[in-house]
Amino acid sequence: MDFHLSDEQRAIQDLARTFAREELIPGCAAFDRLADGEDAFPWDLVERGSKLGFNALAIPTKYGGAGANVLTQCLVMEELSAGDPAVSKVYSHNWKALFGLMAIASEEQVLRVIPDFIEDPRYCLGIAMTEPNSGSDNSLPYAGDTKSGPMLSAVRDGDHYVLNGLKKFIAMGKQAKMLTVFGRTDKSVPWTEGTSAFLLFPPKEGFEIGRLHDKVGLRLYPQFDLLFDNVRIPVEDRLGEEGTVHASRRNITNIGTLEATSTALGIARHAYELAVEYAKERVQGGKPIIEHHAIGTLLLEMFTRLEASRTLLWRSACSIDNGGDDDPKLARATKVMAVETLNYIASHAVEVWGGMGVMKEAPMEKIYRDAIQLYHMGATNQLNILKALPLL
Ligand SMILES: Cc1cc2nc3c(=O)[nH]c(=O)nc-3n(C[C@H](O)[C@H](O)[C@H](O)COP(=O)(O)OP(=O)(O)OC[C@H]3O[C@@H](n4cnc5c(N)ncnc54)[C@H](O)[C@@H]3O)c2cc1C
């Protein structure tokens, strides 16, 4: 594998790094401390990053996007996440949602979203799958089980479907201008055969935004409950044939996994860099603490794990870019390793910072709070392992 980045990749990587350092790090710290609410969404920063090209980076050129490949997208997401992983998640979530859409939508449906998405720097997308009783089961369905999976009902009524039920933890559920909603069109068969997806463009009669969940980290990337009370969706807004959505979504799984991996890597790098910086400045025992072997070797261990995770991420991204996705368990293994690496680095970076590591006036405690969010994004680590096992 060639580890050389092209001039274009370096240019967009530099742009993202500068934006992260100059705007995201100083701009997001204060937002992070706001009580949850609409005013805690960093619209101006999101808009500014969109105008620099981060929202539409990977959209294929035939639709008017920049057509960046998966590796380029991962490079940019690492840089932005090192600045603020929540703002980065806005763009990378949109990336995941759009590629999910393109995998299951007709050309006509795609064209009802992408031009507006490119045009509007505040365009966000939602993916409404999780419900109070269906989380991991949506990632790892059990054969023959009709009782698990999404239960939001989608009943055909003439040239419409009528949706009733509740969705939970939906990222940017309030900000999204279009949501892909997963509903059960047939509850007599397992959800993998009886679920369909629909386009929803709010506002819509019967569709309500419920509570905003109050999280410890990634606070600028909000999750909402969504309520459906006889929401009527035209048949032409169903994505694909009825009941086939599970099968058609299979080929997008690895982009979602690498999206979460890039976020993890960016947070980990930021934690590592701050730990090194602090260890060079902080003097105890008559010398900078980096010169004490216990700290120096810890930092080297962090560096090694970080580099190993990035190498695996690049390898996985190139595997998709080269058209092969040659080993489908690779992306899952990559995500698990990156999240373990992140939480190793974040917790030890807090340690290197001593008492300052947990003080709200210093940056490390936010990094630590952000880090634990990654365990369950892009499916939990356990679920990624369980899904990779049959591929051994
Ligand atoms: C920040 C954030 C953003 C999110 N964004 C979205 C979104 O945009 N759209 C959306 O639809 N959902 C979203 N979710 C929901 C997310 O997908 C779920 O939280 C996730 O799938 C886990 O489901 P759960 O929380 O119900 O946990 P559970 O499924 O209840 O899992 C609990 C624990 O049990 C383990 N477990 C579960 N099943 C098994 C099994 N079979 N074998 C072994 N262990 C198992 C899990 O690994 C986990 O450790 C988001 C969640 C968060 C926190």
Image (cartoon, grey):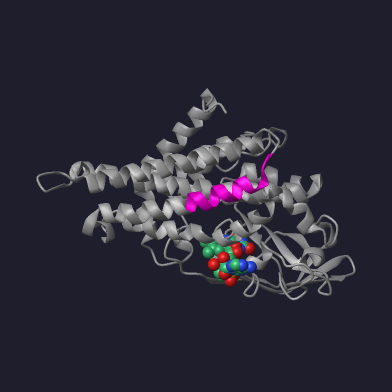
Q: Is residue 146 above or below residue 82?
A: below
Q: Is residue 30 visible?
A: no
Tally of marks = 0
Farthest residue to the front: give it. Answer: 392
Q: Is residue 179 above or below residue 150?
A: above
Secondary structure mostly seen in the magenta stretch: helix
Asked if one can make out residue 71 in the rendered structure from this viewpoint, the answer is yes
Q: Position of residue 255 (x, y in %)?
A: 63, 46
Q: Closest to the observer: 46 or 238?
A: 238
Foreground residue, 240 or 212? 240
Q: Is residue 33 left or right of residue 246?
A: left
Which segment did they paint magenta? 325-339
User: Is 201 situated left or right of 296 in this image?
Assistant: right
Q: Position of residue 269 (x, y in %)?
A: 40, 44
Query: What residue sits 70% from the left and 35% below the top?
Result: 323
Name of the residue lying farthest toward the left: 286
Q: Quadrant of ligand 1?
A: bottom right
How far across and down, in percent of the image, does residue 327 sit? 66, 43
Image quadrant occupied by the N terminus: top right
Is residue 180 located in the magenta-colored stretch of the structure? no
Please state if 60 lies on the left or on the right of 275 as rendered.
right
Q: Quadrant of residue 279?
A: top left
Q: Tell me where residue 143 sits by quadrant.
A: bottom right
Give the residue displayed 46% in from the left and 58% down from the top: 220
Tell me if residue 335 is in the magenta stretch. yes
Q: Residue at x 33, y 42 (%)?
A: 300
Instruction: Identify the residue at horizontal 84%, vertical 75% (top origin).
Output: 188
Along the line of sight, which residue is nearer the eye, 246 or 363? Answer: 246
Point out residue 89 in the picture as x, y percentages from the top left corner: 52, 51
